[in-house]
Image: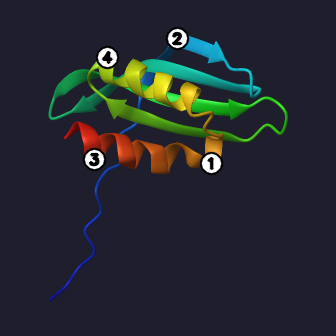
Amino acid sequence: MFGIIRKKRQEVRDRTVYMEVCADNKVSYRVIAGRVFTGGDDIITYGIEAQDLKTGDFETIPDFSRDIEDAVDFAEMLITSRTRPEGIYSRALNYLCVSI
């Protein structure tokens, strides 16, 4: 007998903006800090947001890393490469491939 297994989605709570940079390409990049409840523990996690101030496009990776240095380094990479909000997932994959 087969059944559907669903993984409970973890929600980031107590979201706080740790760092925000408005780049010259009119995109606002943010590093956010929050808490995720997993396995009976509250874990601090850091996410990335990118918002195009011209069009309003918005993308987020709410739980990018548990290390603040990785999140800030990734945000700096997004800023220097002038990444649009729709491109942060592909950049995140590239970043994680290199950092692992």
Task: Say what secondary structure mark 4 lies in.
Answer: helix
Reading the image, the residue beneath label 4 is: 69
Compared across the picture, whether 67 is left or right of 81 comes to left
> Please, which residue is most extreme toward the front here?
80
In space, the residues marked 1 and 2 are separated at their CA atoms by 20 Å
> Mark 4 is on which residue type?
Glu
The first of marks 3 and 1 along the sequence is 1
Label annotation for residue 97: 3
In space, the residues marked 4 and 3 are separated at their CA atoms by 17 Å
Picture coordinates of residue 15 (x, y %)?
Answer: 48, 19
In space, the residues marked 4 and 2 are separated at their CA atoms by 12 Å
Disc 3 or disc 1, which is closer to the eye? 3
In the foreground, 19 or 96: 96
Picture coordinates of residue 82 (x, y %)?
Answer: 63, 33
Q: Are marks 3 and 1 in contact (CB under 8 Å)?
A: no
Q: Dividing the image into 4 quarters, which one contains the N terminus?
A: bottom left
In space, the residues marked 3 and 2 are separated at their CA atoms by 24 Å
Label annotation for residue 73: none
Q: Are marks 4 and 3 in contact (CB under 8 Å)?
A: no
The first of marks 4 and 1 along the sequence is 4
Mark 4 residue crowding within 10 angstroms, few (<14) / some (14–19) / many (20+): few
Label annotation for residue 86: 1
The first of marks 1 and 2 along the sequence is 2
Disc 4 or disc 3, which is closer to the eye? 3
Task: Say what secondary structure mark 3 lies in.
Answer: helix
Task: Say what secondary structure mark 1 lies in.
Answer: helix
Mark 2 residue crowding within 10 angstroms, few (<14) / some (14–19) / many (20+): few
The first of marks 4 and 2 along the sequence is 2
Label annotation for residue 19: 2
In space, the residues marked 4 and 1 are separated at their CA atoms by 23 Å
